[in-house]
Image (cartoon, grey):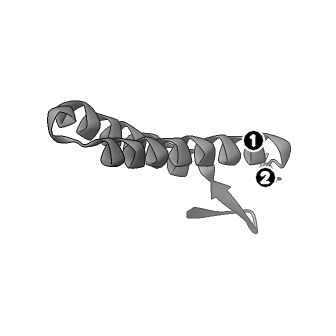
Amino acid sequence: MSMIKNAGYKVLVIVEDVNLLIIAMVAIECYMIIDVKNLDTLRILGITAEVLILAVAILAIRYGHTKFPCETKDDS
């Protein structure tokens, strides 16, 4: 996770982490689409489970970010 110091507070940059998870999910989906002819049933189920785990992780991070927002101090 990226950290930024802002007026004495450490602010987590959640957006970058979510974007990386989305990129990973799309890459796994592209692998599945391109190599679908050579995949057996067990491997397809494994890849599907990977995508579901990443989707749940994205939902958990976004829910946590909206439910427990980072408190920042404005420098106005």
Nearest the eye: 39 or 5: 39
| Circle nearer the viewer, 1 or 2 | 1
Q: Is 25 displayed left or right of 64 in the figure?
A: left
User: Quadrant where the C terminus lies?
Assistant: top right
What amino acid type should be assigned to the residue bearing mark 2?
Answer: Cys
Percent position of residue 60, x then y? 69, 46
Q: Position of residue 5 (x, y in %)?
A: 65, 65
For the point 15% across and 40% down, the residue is 38
Quarter holding the N terminus?
A: bottom right
Q: What is the x, y in percent for residue 7?
A: 74, 63
Q: Residues within 10 Å of mark 1 (few under 14, many from 20)?
A: few
Q: Nearer the viewer, residue 40 or 25?
A: 40
| Figure check: 9 above or below 51 | below
Q: Quadrant of residue 63?
A: top right
Circle 1 is placed at which residue position? Answer: 63
Q: Is residue 17 above or below residue 30?
A: below
Q: Looking at the image, which residue is at 35% across and 48% down?
A: 42
Tag 1 secondary structure: helix
Disc 2: which residue = 70
Please give the name of the residue rendered at 78% of the width and 40% of the height, measured from the top-left corner. 66
